[in-house]
Every structure is written in structure tokens, then in C-alpha cells.
Amino acid sequence: MAVPEAGRPPPPLPGDHADGASPPLLSPLSTAAAPGGAPASPPNVDRSPSPRAERSPKATRPGEGTGGEVPPDPATLQIFRNLFSSVAEEMGVALIRSSYSPNIKERRDLSCALFDAQGRLVAQAAHIPVHLGAMAFSVAAAIERFRLAPGDVVVLNDPFLGGTHLPDITVVSPVFAPDGPTDTPAAFVASRAHHADVGGMVPGSMPQSTEIYQEGIIIPPVKIIDRGQLNEAVLEIICRNCRTPEERQGDLAAQLAAHRVGETRLHELMNKYGVAEVRRQMAALIDYAERLTRATIAAIPNGRYEFIDYLDDDGVTDQPIRIQVAVTVRGDELEVDFTGSDAQRRGCINAPLAVTSSATLYVVRCLSDERVPANQGCLNPVRLVAPLGSVVNATPPVGVCGGNTETSQRITDVLLGALAPVLPARIPAAGQGTANNLTYGGYDPFRERYYAYYETVGGGMGASAQRAGMSGAHVHMTNTQNTPAEALEFAFPVRIREYALRPGSGGAGRHRGGDGLRRAVEFLAPATVTLLTERRRFPPYGLEGGAPGAVGRNWLLRPDAEPRLLPGKGTVDVAAGDAVLVETPGGGGWGRPDG
């Protein structure tokens, strides 16, 4: 059965720098209102009732905020940096090894992090970028909702209270000092894991929704453990609203186990070094990250840099969605202004503020070198302007399941595109710009149970001034692994018919963009398949004369029928013997091919 070869459309709208009248420097910005009016905002957000609330207002200058004490010496600070990071890393290992689902155990769609007593990010494991920048919002929501006591654990997934999309369930645990006061936590540990199904209108909980209620169960901040006692009712409500309750229970238990590991390791540090010293080192590490980030920003020439790119559509209409940014550099501070981006849409590609903040943090981290710890200090010099009710700062009850995976990628693309002219040696061409979300589920007649699965598929990485783009990789906001064919075929009634690179899909250039992938999943029993993909219309841009990467394509392959081209976003029912082929985009090229 022949499948058409990849083609490349004429040059698209994306990649053009903004022209014409500049948008106003300031615009109304408010954190998305949560049910009941509580703001979904991390600790350093202005919560004033005025119509303008600025993300990360100017923080204390580096060196302040430690009580006027002498800052730790560099060697000690580096030791504690690694100690804090190791807590998050060990939590991640425990979660992976004890999880139930292939989505966490094999694909590793999870994140773990450590926060100080104020809920500021201190350290994180090398997990999913879109999770880690947003988790501070969820920690803040837990702090605001409850007066936490020893043995309490909070669970939530509400995207308008710091979540990313409903399948990403966050667990937050306070950590109290050993033999210390029980009214004030000394720190927090948190984990976020993508659960392969949390209910909703299709298996996998990534539907073509028009409101968030269609996407699955919404969990506001609630105690799943209260003073050491499991809240059976909360667990039962969550599992009863999912197609795969045993899997949900197993994965939640794995998150709770990871938190016990994190709490144990923090207690060991507090017993060895003292609570005051641990807290002092946390504050110093945040200050250190801020100093290095400010130095990175100060090395960028002052100015205002603009860029525009587009999402293909929202799945309801074929109208493109404009993402516009103006990055203003003033000394050692950065303003990121999304004024001019389209209003939130009826489809599910709307991004909550936490997702936009997370993508911004990711790009700021990319500008810095590896010496900079990934914590709240990286965002302190950054002011984020995202108009309320826009596609980058959505309000309830719009759908958001694709905003986390797809809009976050385009936010990253426009931020890097804006800075490319002034940092040509450091900014790569656009990568594939999509997670290529593929979800499917149904009844498994071989195992006599229902199943649901979700995966993302890698593609081409953009080329840079230094090298060609990597092929078949997860790019930017999706840092998961590829699910092994053996793991899928062992767990579900599917067969991986093809899994290969897509030759020639990377954009030409002095350095060529990475190639995308071809992944064909054959179904051995009837199933419902949902695709939520991007860059099927507007290809990833090249830089410095490099060509764009090829757009992606989705195909339905049926026995004794011609291949059928599927839209980028949609749901289709398949029969036994049918297959879905996902061809992922290539990365953009860098530099003119002739040099």
C-alpha cells in the first residue's frame, strides 16, 4: 500500500517579523481567575485587584532576601545545588520504577521538583520543561487553599490553578522540619505525571473539545492524604471517572511513594546540616540563579525584538491562530509581551497562564549556560505580559488540552524567533513545533479489559550555526522518551507496523534540519483514535537563509483501500487491521545551502 511522499507547501505566513505599528508596550494582564475568584498565580505574582497584575514583578536584588547574612561560599553552594537536585532526581527514579502505566514507566512523562517554604522553585530533575515551569503555580494554589499539617498531601490538575492540562495530575507535599514546628512547612516537594486517561469524551483524554468539561475530571486542590490518612473518597472519585481505574490508582500510588522519598531525603539534609542552613542555601541558590540570569540578559543588546508565528487551526475551524511576541531587553531585565496574539478560541489549543510562563522560563534557561540552576531566580528578572482572555492566557471554561502540548511549542518558537536576529550564533531554526499527540483506546479482547494510551512522537530538531539538527527527537517542551515498540505491543492490542526516520523532511541549509519520523500503529481490535497535531499547514521556519522543514501528515491506512489523509486534529474510529501513520515535521535549516 503506497503512501504519498512528503511534500512541502509554498512559503507560509509564519516566520515573518512583525511589521507595521507596534503594539502598546503595556497591556491589561491578569492571572486567570480560578473558580471562586482565587488567582492561579505563583508566589512572586502581584495579586492586587487592579486590572494589571504583572507576572514576576521586579524582585529583590541578588544578595537580598537572606536576612542580611553573609552569602554561602561558592563551593558550599555548589554542594547544596547538587544535593537539592539529587532529591528531585531520586523522586523521579522512584516514580518511574513504581509506576503502573507504560506512559510513565517507559515514556517517562513525569516531573519532580523541590520548593522552598514560600513555594519558590529551588531545584528540579531533568524532566518535562512544560511541567516544571508551571508547577510553582500548583504549589501556590495548594498553599493558598489549605493550612497544611504534617502528613498532608494535596492533589490537583485544574489548568486554571496551575495545571497544564487535565491528564497532568500534580501532587504537592509539605515537608516539616524534624522535631520542628508543625504549623509552618520548611519546604515542599511536588510531582506531576501524565495519566493516560482521566475521563472525558475520548480515550486518552485529549479530545477535540470546545470546553474543559469534555476533557476529563477536573480536580481542584484537595487533600488526598489528611494527616497521614488516605482520603479514600477522593481516590474513588478520581478512579471512578477514568476508563482505567486500576492504572490511575497505581500511578497515583507511585507519585505518593516518590514524595515519601523526597521527604526522607530532605529530612536527612536537615538533620545533617540544620534546618536554618538548608533554608539559607535554598535562598542563596535562588539568588545565584538570578545573578547569572541577569548577566545573561545584560549581554543581549538593548532593544525591542518582535516575531509572529501561527498555529494551524483550533480543530473547530481552519482559521490560523496568531501568536505574537515583543521581547524588550533593558539592561539586565527582560519583558516578554504577547499583546497582539489572538483571542482564545473555541477549540482546545488555548494555553493557561502557567503554560505560557513555563515556556518563557524554558527559553530563558536556553539562553543561559548550564551553570545556571533551574529555579525561580531565572524568572525574577523577567516581566511577562499576556492579555487575559487571549490564546496565551485563557480563561475558563475553554478547552486547554492542546494548549499545553501545541501552543507551548509555538510560544517557544516565537520567543526564539524574536531573538534570532540579535543572537544569530545561539538561536537554532524552528524544530518540529508539535508533540504529535496520538491517543487511542477501547476494549482489549485479549486481556479482557478496557485500555487507553497516550504518546507523543518525536520529529526534526532545528539546525543551528554550529551543527545540523538532530533527527527523530522530542523538541523543546516535550522531553519524553519514545515508547519502545515492545512495551506497546506487550501492554495493548496494537502492533507497530513502521517506525523509521523520514528522509529529506529536514530543511536544507548550510546546516540541515533534522528529519522527522514515520510511526504506523496497527490496531488488532476496534479502537477510537484521536490526533492532536500541529505544523501540518505552516512548516517550521529556517534561519539565515535556511529552508523550512517539511510539514507533518497523518494517514489512515485500511486494508484494500487507498490511504486517507487525516486532518491535524480529529478523532476516528478504527477496525481491527486498520493502522494510523503519523509523519512528523522536519526541523528548519540554518544558513544558505550554498554557504
Image: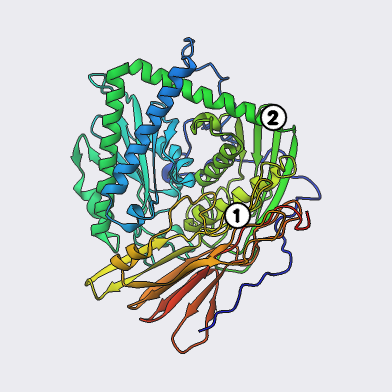
Taking depth in this image into account, of 342 and 362 the one nearest to the observer is: 362
Residue at the outermost right position = 20
Local packing at callout 1 (Cα closer than 10 Å; few below 14, some 14-19, many 20+) is many
Where does label 1 land, which residue? 431
**Residue 257: x percent and y percent?**
25, 42
Taking depth in this image into account, of 496 and 510 the one nearest to the observer is: 510
Q: Judge left or right: residue 355 versus residue 430.
A: left
Where does label 2 land, which residue? 299
Q: Relative to 217, does residue 305 appear above or below in the rendering?
A: above
**Residue 385: x percent and y percent?**
62, 40
**Residue 12: x percent and y percent?**
72, 63
Residue in view at x 73 percent, y 68 percent: 10
Q: Amino acid at mark 2?
A: Ala
State the separation of the CA atoms marked 1 and 2: 25 Å
Q: Judge left or right: residue 468 versus residue 156.
A: right
Residue in view at x 54 percent, y 49 percent: 476
Whether residue 116 is visible here, answered yes or no, is no
Whether residue 281 is visible here, answered yes or no, is yes
Local packing at callout 2 (Cα closer than 10 Å; few below 14, some 14-19, many 20+) is few
Q: Quadrant of residue 95?
A: top left
Q: Amino acid at mark 1?
A: Gly
Asked which secondary structure carries label 2, the reply is: loop
